Amino acid sequence: MTAVERARRTAAADALCLQAYDASAGPAQGAALVAVGGYGRGELAPYSDLDVVLVHDEGVDLGETPTKLWYPLWDSGANLDHSLRSLPEMVSAADGDVRVALGLLDVRHLAGDPNLTLRLRTTMLANWRRHARERLPGLRTMVRQRHELLGELAHVSVPDLKEAAGGLRDATILKALVATWLVDVPHTDLEPRRQDLLDVRDHVHGIAARATDRVAPEMWRELAERLGLPDERAAQARVRGIGRRITHLSGLTWRRVDALIDRPAGVRPRRPELTPLGPGVALSGGEVVLAPGAKPAEDPLLLLRAAALAAERDVVLAPPTAARLAREAAPLPVPWPPEARRLFVRLLASGHGLRSVWETLDETGAVDHLLPEWERIRLLPHASVIHRFTVDRHVVETCIEASTLIRAVARPDVLMVAALLHDIGKGSLTEHSVAGAPIAREIATRMGFEPAAVDLVETLVRWHLLLAAVATTRDPDDPGTVEAVRAHVTDPAALDLLVALTEADARATSPKAWSSWRASLIRDLARRARVALDTGAALPPLVVEEMAVPRQVRRKGEASFDVSPVADGTRVTVIARDRVGLLADIAATFAMQRLRVRAARAWAQESYGVSVWELDEEPLDPAVLRERYEAISERRIDPASRLRPSDTTTLAPSVAVRPEASTQATVLEVRATDRPGVVYLVCAALARLDVAVRSAHVDTLGPQAVDVFYLQEASAGVLGDERAAQAAHAVRAALSGEPV
C-alpha cells in the first residue's frame, strides 16, 4: 500500500504545483517548473520536502512569476525547497557539484514548457555520461566518507535509512552509475529492495510524525506491527537485511568501477582471461569463478576452495558462482575431511578479504551450506550499544582481527574457529557463553577436529569474557584474582589462545573496548596466570606500578596531580596521604569538572594513597585539578549537593558483595548507568561508614560503569557480614538518589 500512497502523495503535490504555476501566470514557453531529487523520482514520504526548480532559457522575462509562484506552495503547508535558475546555470551547478548532478538526473516536468524540461533532462544525462570517468573518483570518495561517518544500515544501533551504507542514498547512486553506461547493476535485484526501503521510511515518518530517516530503538516494536511482522527482532532482520543486500550490490559495483577507473581512458577492456587458481576454480575479470568443466556435485570441497582463494586474494567471489555452488555442491561428509577444515581455516584467516567473500556466501545461502547454525545470529542486534555491528558481522570482524594474531598461538586453526563461534550462543535465554559452548563443541566435532582441539574450542567459547571481566574488575595483587582464571583455564596454550581471542573480540567491538588501559590490564593478568600455570606458583605481589612519592607529598602533606597524554585520552596520577574518604574527594574533583572517567585504579602504598585515572578529555591543567581538590578536601565546596543523582528513570543500580573474589578484603561490585559522580557517590557513602577502600577498579564500557571496590575496616580487616550488607545498602541508596 505504501507505494500506492507515495503515488497518491506525488500526484497531489503535482496538482498543487501546476495550480500554483498557472495562478502565477508562468510562461508556457521558455520556462518550466520541474521536480528534482526524491520528488523527481515520485518518492514522496509523508513529511518529505518538495524539491522544485523554476528553470528558464536565457533572455526569457519571467515577470512576477517567481514571486507569485512560491507563496501558494508555502501557504499550502508544504515543506518547500525551491530555487530559480537558467538552463546554463543548471549545467554549471551540475558541473561544479556532483551532488547537484545526481539530483538533476531525476528531473521531472511539473508545469510550463515540456520541451524545456526535455532539453534539461537530455542535457543533464548527456553531461553525466560525458564526464562520468572524471567524476567517479570524487563520487567514490564522497561515498566512502559518508559510510565511515554513518556506518552500515545493516549493523549500526540507530540506522539511517537514507545516508547509512546500504541506504536509499546508495541505491540512488547505483542507479546513477547505471546511467553512465559504464557499469551495470542487477535491476531486478536492486529495485525491489529500494522500494522496500522506501516503504520502511514511510512507516518511520508515520511513527515519528515528522521527517526523519533514523530508526530509533523505541520505533522497532511499532514498525514490526506496521510491517506485519511478529516482533522487533523480525523487524530489525527485515530492515537490516535490505540494507545488507544493497550494501553488497554497492560493494560489487564499486569494485567494478574501481577497475574501470584504473584502466587508462580510451583503452578497451580486454576479453576476460581465465587464470586457473585451483581444481575447478579460476580468476576472470577480477572475480573468482568456476573453471570450465567444474562439477560441483562431484566435489564437496569446491565451495570452500573458491571462497578461500577469493578471500586470500581479496577479490570478488562471483555471486552467480557462489549461488550455483550453494545449490549444486555436494554436501561435506561428517566429519569433514582434513582438507575441508584447512580450507575453512584459510578462509577465516584471510584478513580483510574475508569480509566481502563472507557477505557473498551469506547473501547466496552458501553459508548455511557450511554452517547451518549461522541462522541463530544472522542480523541479530547486540544488546550493548558499544558494539559497532550486529552479531553476525561482529564475529566476522573478530576473525579479521584474529588473523593478525595467529603467530602468537600454537593452534591458529582453533583460534580462527573459536573467533567465528564465540558469540554463537547470542539470542539464547541463558548467558551466551554458556549457551554457545556446547554448540561450538558440536560444530568443531562435525568439522573433524581431534578431541583435544574440540575441548579447546569449547573452552574458548565458554570463557571468552573471562580475562576482560577479571582484569578490569579485580585487584591484581589479590591471590584470588589469578585463581579466578586458573580455575577455568588450566593449560598455557589455552591461555595464549584466550588472550588472542580476547584482543580480537575487543578490537572488533569498538576502539574503546581495546584501549591501551584495558590492554595493559588484560596482558598483565595473563602474564600472572601464565606464570602460575607454568610453575604452579603465583607471581609475588606487584601493584599496577610502584609510584615514587613526590617531595611535596612527603614533606608538606599536599596532594600531587601528574597529568600526561596517552594514545586515547589523558592519564592523571594522584598521590596523597592515605585516609578514609580520599578516593571520594579525588573522584569528586573530576566529577565537578564534568570529566568523564573511562577507567581508574587505586591502591595503598606505604602510608599514601595512589590512584591512576584514564579520562577521555585532552590534557588538563594539574594546577586547576589540585585547586579544586583542595577546595573539596577542605570542605570549602560540598560536592554532595551538586553530584546527587538527578535521573532516576534509568535502570536501578546493581550492588553486590562478592565473597568468592578475595579472602583479604570484602569485594563490592557496582554496576550503574555511567554518569559523572558515580565513583564519588560510592566512595562518599563508604567514607561515611568509616570503611576504607583498599583498592578500586573502575571501568566504563558504553553506557554502563562496572566498578569494583576492595574494602576493609579503617582499622584493617575484612568487613563482617552485617557491615558488608550495610555498606552495600548505603552505596545502593546513594546511587539511587535516596536521602543520606
Image (cartoon, rainbow, N blue to C red):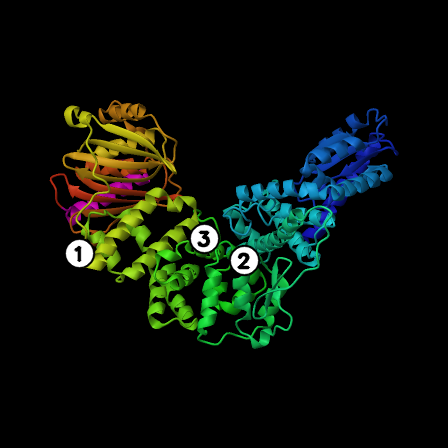
Identify the residue at horizontal 30%, vertical 23% (top origin): 623
For disc 3, the marked residue is 382
Work out which quarter of the rendered image holds the C terminus and state it.
top left
Residue bearing the label numbered 2: 313
Q: Nearer the viewer, mark 2 or mark 3?
A: 2
The single residue placed furthest to the left in the displayed view is 715
- Label 2 is placed on what type of residue? Arg
Q: Is residue 655 visible?
A: no
Q: Residue at x 83, y 41 (%)?
A: 118
The kind of secondary structure element at disc 2 is helix
Rendered position, 281 above or below 9: below
The Cα atoms of the two marked residues, 2 and 1, are separated by 47 Å
Between discs 2 and 1, the one toward the N terminus:
2
Seen from the viewer's position, the closer of residues 416 and 477 is 416
Instruction: Tell me which label, 2 or 3, sits earlier in the chain.
Output: 2
Q: Which mark is residue 537?
A: 1
Q: Is residue 734 magenta?
A: yes
Residue numbers of the magenta segment: 718-739
Between label 2 and label 1, give the one nearer the viewer: 2
Q: Secondary structure at mark 3?
A: loop
Identity of the amino acid at label 3? Answer: His
